[in-house]
Each structure stands twice: as structure tokens, then as C-alpha cells.
Amino acid sequence: MAVEPDDYRPRKRRGFQKQSLPLIIIVVLLVGGVLFAGFKLGSALLNYHRDRSAYNALADEALSGLAEPNATLRPDETPDPNATVEVQSEAPFAVNWEYLRSVNSDVVGWLYCEGTQINYPVVQTSDNEYYLHRDFTSKQPNTSGTLFVDPNATLGVIYSNYIIYGHNMKDGSMFASVEDYVAQSYYDQHPSMYFLTPDQDYRIDLIAGRIVESTLDNYPSYFSDADYSNYLNNITSHSFFGTRANVTTGCQLITLSTCDYSSGYSDPRFLLQGMLVPIQ
């Protein structure tokens, strides 16, 4: 009986297309999703690095007398809760306002907190939208935006609230460290900031840190004498940290506002508030 030679042609696997095609599509979609997520993450990291580099270069040009403009704790360092930080009565550096104005004429001040990434110029315009996603130097769209003052705020008016807005960036820049004031130990290490302006330098003695809804009643602009006193008592009694600053109606209030990601709020904001104390 003759033996039939094996068929040299590859045998068609029954059901291959019907059973394997959906799996191939799923794998392709998963790989595509991973690649797209990696691209988005890489783009975000690149933007963060670009924005930080631009602000560092600006600080190098505009500030003098500050050795490490963006000095910060190493990731493995934690503040000593028993340590005390001396509050300075003079400006930590000088600002070249002529240079800053040549870069951006909307500049009104420079905000600085030692040992953190808060070391930025502050602008003010007629609205709260323009600098939300525009950089300081070129005014071009970007992720980090620029710190900006509420258009209704006026510096030097005692019974008023000087509000500065900034993004809570995931790389720790801009106002991300504001949320760290949920801890008493963090406040103990950073009880004050500095707001320098062309006409007057201020020390910010921090008095309260709170999470609130983003509603107009949580952003008062002006106070009567009695209302101001009641407001200061209210915010300090609901603060995450206890302040050692002198809470007085004789100084203007300043509020740093940023987004918060706490549960239990529909549109939460973290408000860090302090007294603007004029210094030499």
C-alpha cells in the first residue's frame, strides 16, 4: 500500500482567526495605551523640567545675596519637630526690579520661603485667567503658569485680603508645598515667608492653614474693623497648625491659595494665610 507523502503546505489551523483576533486587538490596545501613557508622562516631566529651569534662570538673574535660591530638604530628610527657626527681620536678598520689569512689566513682587521651592515672581493683571497657564518670561501657554495676585487686591491696605493664586504642581513646584502646612512640624520649620516689592519688603508671619470650598465667602476682599478681628479669630481657631506669630488687626492679611485634593469637598482649596509685616 502506497504511503502518501506529507502535504508540504502548512495546515490551516481551525478557528485561528476567530479565536485569536480579539486577543490580538486587546494586546495592541493595551500596548498602545501604555505607550500613550508613557508619552504623556514624559511630556509632563519635560514640561516640569523646562518650567523649573526657566524660573531658576530668572532667579539667578534677578536676585542677589541668596546663595541657594531653591534650596530644599532632601527626600530622606524630615524636619525636627523640636527645632526652632529664627524669624529674620530683614529681607533675605535684593531684587533687581529694573531687570524683572524689562522681562515682564506685570510683575508686582517676589515671594520666597526658605527651604522650599517657593521662590517666584508674582504678577497682577485685570483678571484671574491670563496667567493661569502662561509663564512669566514669554507669556506663552505652559503647565505651571505664574503666581498672580487677585485683581481686586491692593497692597498696603490694612483691612483687606491680599490674595495670591498658584498651581499645586505634582513635581512639588509652585504652591505644592503650601499643603505641607497640614503638619505642625512643617510650620515649625517654616513659620514665615517673604514678599518683596519695588516699594516695600514684607515678612509674612503665617497664622493659619485651612481647607475650604472654592466659594466667594471664603475669599473676602475687605473687612470692617470688627469683621477683621472676627475673621482672624475664626481662621486661627480652624487652622491645622498653631501659630506663634502675633495675630493683629494692625497688619494686612495675605492669603496663598492653591488646589487641594481632599475628599469631602466638591471643589477644595488650601488657604495658607499670614500677616504682612513691613521690614527694612
Image (cartoon, rainbow, N blue to C red):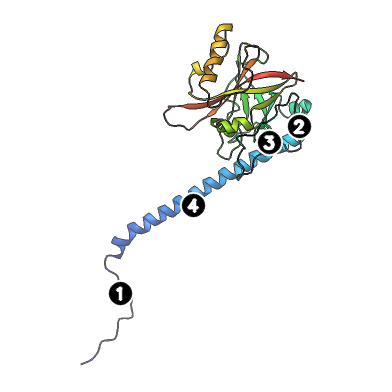
The residue identified by callout 3 is 55
Q: Nearer the viewer, mark 3 or mark 1?
A: 3
Q: Name the residue at 51% across, 49% down.
A: 38
Residue beneath the point at 54% across and 11% down = 230
Q: CA distance from mark 1 to mark 2?
A: 75 Å
Q: Residues within 10 Å of mark 2 (few under 14, many from 20)?
A: some
Residue 240 x/y as whole percent = 53, 27
Which labelled disc corresponds to residue 35?
Answer: 4
Residue lying at the far top in this picture: please name it: 225
- Dot 1 amino acid type: Arg
Give the mark toward the camera: 4 or 3: 3
Q: Which mark is residue 11?
A: 1
Name the foreground residue: 9 vs 105.
105
Q: Amino acid at mark 2?
A: Ala
**Mark toward the start of the polypeptide (1 vs 4):** 1
SS class of the residue under badge 1? loop
Find the distance from the CA under tag 3 to the CA under tag 1: 66 Å
- Tell us which disc is closer to us: 1 or 4: 4
Where is mark 2, residue-wise? 62
Q: From the viewer's perspective, is the residue at label 2 or at label 4 nearer?
A: 2
Upstream in sequence: badge 3 or badge 1 = 1
Question: Disc 3 marks which amino acid?
Answer: Tyr
Mark before the other along the chain sequence, 2 or 4: 4
Question: In the rendered image, is residue 123 in sight?
Answer: yes
Q: Disc 2 or 3, which lies upstream in sequence?
A: 3
